[in-house]
Structure formats: C-alpha cells, structure tokens
Amino acid sequence: MPCEGKPRFVVLYGSQKGQAQSIAEGIAEEAEQHGLVADLSCLNQNEKFNLEKERAPVIFIVSTTGDGEPPDNALRFVRCIRKKTLSPDHYKHLCYALLALGDTNYTDFCNCGKTIDRRLQELGARQFYPTGYADDGTGLEVVVDPWLEGLWNGIREALSKMASDRTAHLTQNVEDSSLEIPDSSILDFHLKPLSIAHQQNCEPVKASVNMDSKHASPVSSSASAVSDLSPASSAGSTRLASQSVGTGSVSTSVPKAQTKDDGVSHAALAASLTSSLPPLAESSLNVPALPPPYLDVIFQEVDTEEQIIGPLNKEGLHQVPISKAVQMSRGDSVKTALLLELDISAHPAMDYQPGDSFNVFCPNRAAEVDSVLRRLGLQDKENHHVHVTMKKDTNKKGAQVPSHIPQNVPLLFLLTWCLEIRSVPKKAFLRALVEYTADGVQRRRLQELCSKQGAADYNLHVREPSLSVLELLAAFPSCSPPLSLLIEHLPKLQPRPYSAASSCLRCPGKLHFVFNVVEFPACSGRPVGGRGLCTGWLFDLINPGLVFPVKAEATSGLALPKIHVSLRPNCSFRPPSDPSVPFIMVGPGTGVAPFIGFLQQREEERKKNPEASFGETWLFYGCRHRDGDYLFREELESSVSSGTLSHLKVCFSRDDRKDEEAVTSAPQPRYVQHNLLLHSQQVTDLLLRRNGCFYVCGDAKNMAKDVNEALIEMIKTELQSDKLEAMKRLATLREEKRYLQDIWA
C-alpha cells in the first residue's frame, strides 16, 4: 500500500535477461528518497496494474530480444495494445515515460520500446519525459545514467501538473454544482520543491546502473555509500583530506605521481584493473548507494554425496549422445572449427526444420567452480544442500528468490548449473563487494570502478575484456563476499544456441551443428587466456576421443558422451514455402550452417518431386583461407554439381589474390559484401522484380552491418534513388519477411 500522503507513480518492466528489471527495481527503491512511492510490476502481471484506469505517471522500462521481439514477459502486453479495435483516445488519460534497452549490433534496435512508445501515442497517451534509447553494444549506462538523473524532476513536474489538472477539474465541478472546494493542501500531494537539506540527503548523485542479463539496481548515493572513499595511488598510499557526508562525494588528495626522466609516470606504467591514475585517483567520487541485501542462505548437511549429472529436468530438455565429431578446419588455422552429430532418434520431440536452432546446456568448468568454493571458504560444504529464503527485514522493492535458483540442491550443483560465474560483474555488484573488502586501497579501487567518474576505467578493465566475477575476486584478494551476494547479483547460467546444419530428410534421427572454439586473450585482470565456456567444454568432451580427420566416424564400442539440449524453433528463418521462389543466402564462416540444412532439404525435395519448379538459389560464402577453413567445401560443390545450388560465390580474406587477379584482370573480393556488390544487378533483380528472399547468418557486429550497407548501396544504384529511399525499400523487404537474419554479437 502507498504511504499515506506520499504521491505515487507506476513502474512497469519487460525484461528477458534481467537488465530492464534491474533498472526498474532501482527506480522503485530510490523513490522513497524523493518522497515518492513506486508501484512496481512486470508487464505480464496485469492483475497488479490497470492502465485503463491509471491516473498516476507510468514509467516503462523495456528491452528487446531476438529479431526485434518483445521479451517473453512483455509479449502479451504488446499484443494487447496493438489491437486494432482500440480507439484513438483509449489512453488519453495516461501520462508516461519510457526507457528502451537494445543493441545496435542488431538491426531492429530497441524495437520493442519503439513499438510500445509509438502505440501508446497512437492511443492518446502523453509523454512527460523524453524516451531514452540505451545501447548495450556501447554500454547501457551511457544513456541510462543521465536518463535516470533527470527522471525525478520529470516525475515531480508530471505529478504537479496532474494535481493542477485535477484541481481545475474539481473547481469547474464546484462552479457547476456549487459544491465546497476541498482544501488545496489535499490536492497538491506535497509536491512542493524539496528543501535544500532534504535534497542533500536524498537526491541521487548521478545514478549508476547495472546493465545485466545481469543484475543489480541503479540507486542514489547516500551517507552509507561514501563512508570510505579515500583515493589510492599506484603505489598504494592514501590520505583522506576531507569528506562531505550526505552528498555522495568526497574531496581527497594523494602524493603526486613520480615521473621518470622521459616524463612517463610510474603510475601510468602500472595502470590496470587494480591501480588507477590521476585525475581519477585524486577525484571525489559519485558512487551508487549500497544495493539492499535480500536473501538468506542456509546450509543443510546430508548423509550421502550426490552425483552431479546435468541441469534439472524440465519440459523440452533432452539428453542426447554425440555420435560423431569432425574437425573441419586444418590444424594450423586461426580458428578450430568442429562439426558434431547428435543422435536424436530416441527423441521424436526434437523433430526440427531447416533454419531452426537448439540450446546446449553446458556446466561451469569444474576448476572454476572449485575456485569459487575455495574463495568463499565453502569447499567443505560443496555437498551440503542449499536453502535460499527472503530476508524478513529487506527493503528491496519486488524482492523474491530468483526463479533460476532451485531449493534443496547441493551447493556444487548450484554453482555448476545455475549461476553464470563467468558473467561480467555489474557496477551495483562492485558497490556491494566494497562492503566485504578489508584492504583500504582495494576498497577505493572498487569504488572508483563503480562510480560515475570511473566509467571509463570500468569499461576498459572490466566490461571490454569481459572480466568474470572470479577473475575480479582474484584481483582483489581481500574481498570475501558471502554466497548470498553471488546469488543476488549473478544471472542465470544461460544455454548456448546453435543453428542446425542438417535436414531431417537427409539425416533422419541426426542433428548436425558446427562451431568455432572461442579463444579469448589475456589482459590485466586475466593473466592467462582461455576458451569460451560452451565451446571449450564441448571440445574437452570429445577430445581426444572423438575428434578425427574429416569424414572419420566414431570408433565402435566407444562410450559416447552425452549433452543436454532443447529445440528452439524459428518460425521465420525458413526456406520459402513455395519452392519456385528464388533466394539468396549469405553466411561466411560458421554462418553457413543453417544454409547447409536449406540445401539438404532442397535436394531431397527435388528427388521426391523431379517435375516441380524450383527457384534459383545463391550462396555467398567467405572464410580466411581456401585450404584452411573452407567449411563444407565438398558438400557445397556437390550441391552446385547437382543443380541444387545455382550459384556459389566464395571469397577468401587472407589468401594471396594476386595470381587470380592476374588471370581475371580484376580485383578479387575479400569479404561477402564485396562479392554481393560484384553481382549487384542479379541480386537486386531477384529481390526487387522476382519477389525473392534474402537470408543472412553470422556476425552481427561487422558482417551483418556491412551486408546491410551493401544492399542499401545496390538498391540505391538500381533504383537511381537517394539513400533514404533505398533504406525504405529494404525496410519493406523486412516487413514482408523477405530479408531475414539469424545473427549474433
């Protein structure tokens, strides 16, 4: 229930991995410091809010998932407001603000937020504060922090205006009906400007947001948030000069950095995750307030040890054997590409279609889990059962035990299958870790990394190298957080999706997929490089037992390893239902995987219906070296020979092309977008005049953007139009589901 006398507003969120929910919870938690009350709800909890009757300001925090789709918990709401039967004044009473989260590596940036924003205005709703569009590709906090900072004045102004409107309305009613006018003090909801003293204690000092899948709350500074902000020099000496408690900042001074004869400071040479430089090392800091703890953990000893086999059983989850493994790249290639075959014959529910993908559920590495146990001092409790409950005295808004945390499971299981211990620690988590860090220099550095002033250091030393929680704890040895803090802040261990690289018609009872073993480099917080969690696990699972030269089969009698998978049907990324429709496929590297399924399906259909009309097919493929990592080469060339693939256009970005250029007297394409431009007339003719389809699979950050730009240039040239008109034509192809992408960042 709202506090009596305090004005209220509503916060609604739609969140797929936790970012939007975290920000919404932070707003709700901070409201009390501003003399306000927030009603927090998820967009799928329509029993908790009623926008048709809501007269308070409403704040929407929504993310976008998949190919511009709403999060699962916002899908029903979006469908409801998109109903054509709603009148243009359906929400004329509604006053709202909206923060949209997205990623510019994907085409439909913030599409869910844009959809809700546009539709609310079409239904008569009014904005009281500008919409924010935050980009996870560059860092959500770049937009989120200033948006949150200005939000509170926006809410106050909206409440004040709404109160004034109600007063005017009541006054009009009084004049019409000669009723007594209520006391104006009842109508203004105490919306007078806060006193200076009140502002000093309660105003947010540059809100700092957690951008998770990925947790924690953007909340304001308070006296408790700045109790120890003494700066640290690279040499580790500190001196607190003065402190302004209550404003979220301190004034400090440190010894000046010593310099060598060449003018390069020792501090600059030592700048790293654990050491900062002036001016940051000498700055007053604005840090977020301490996120309120909300979980208790109880350990229960059990008599027997339990074998940790896999994730908890749930609908759609299947344990299937790896029946074959093939190394597709040559040993000296930059990347190691592997093809795995899964035997799904005992699982009819895994019947997939070309274009579908599936989730692989992988565990955290045993060595890393053991490191976490040792760091938390819980190695002797790994087989104890864990019970997680809510703190009775927590003041966290909307607090609940995370849905991905099962009850009464061994601690070892919890850390192995439930928590993403490799997740990048968010700023709110760093702020919470300060309270469990004994060393003053290390405390100061953690405060810098989560502060507004330390945003660049956070991005450089934590976010960009994707530093894990475990690596961060290794860098700050005096930090000893409890298990409850990890459960509160670490996201769910997510399954990894892979595209099916086969067709059930060609390979009944089998499912193929191909992947590169991900390698990531060492950095200041990571002394030794490593491998991707899932690809490294799969590689270890089959090596050396099942990795053979190309075409080699698994040896008979060998115990086959098993993995847990679930199907992810894709209703749009499919070959045209009409076989006569021509289509173009663009898939460099492992992005070719779904198109192998397309071609296998097409070949089997041609065998069954030799008299049918089949449209023209193109594949634009690219890799580094013709002889090193040309994936599926023989199969693709066979598809050309059989007529299943009409045109195969291949380019090699690292091969010496001088010999070929000497023969052809023309420059050879380096990347797929260059090859597309070389065949511009045929491509645009197929798309614009023959109603063909265009498919792209692979890297979103570079390749997909470059292909999109190439298409715009090609359409612009073909239509002799400007860029805007070409972009509109491309947008039309998307709307018609004739330009489809299956891409990843």
Image (cartoon, helix red, strand yellow):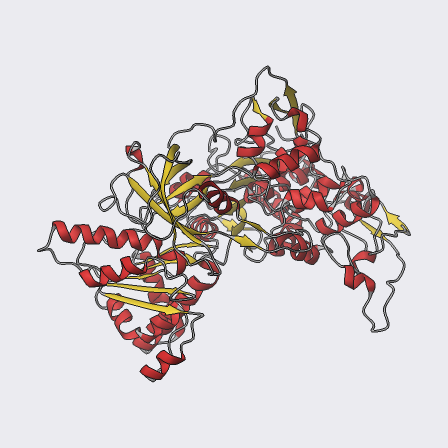
Above or below: residue 558 compared with residue 461? above
Report whether 410 appears left or right of 279: left
Residue 133 locus on image (x, y percent): 54, 55
Q: Residue furthest top?
A: 303
Front residue (pair 658, 48): 658
Residue 178 visible in the displayed image: no
Above or below: residue 726 compared with residue 530? below
Residue 65 visible in the displayed image: yes
Report whether 601 appears left or right of 47: left
Report whether 702 appears left or right of 130: left
Query: Residue 401's quadrant in the figure?
Result: top right
Residue 527 locus on image (x, y percent): 67, 52
Residue at 71% from the left image edge and 35% from the top image edge: 481
Front residue (pair 706, 698): 698
User: Quadrant of the image for the N terminus?
Assistant: top right
Residue 280 locus on image (x, y percent): 78, 58
**Across the whole image, how many numbered discs are drawn on residues?**
0
Residue at 42% from the left image edge and 29% from the top image edge: 314
Front residue (pair 328, 124): 328
Residue 272 locus on image (x, y percent): 73, 56
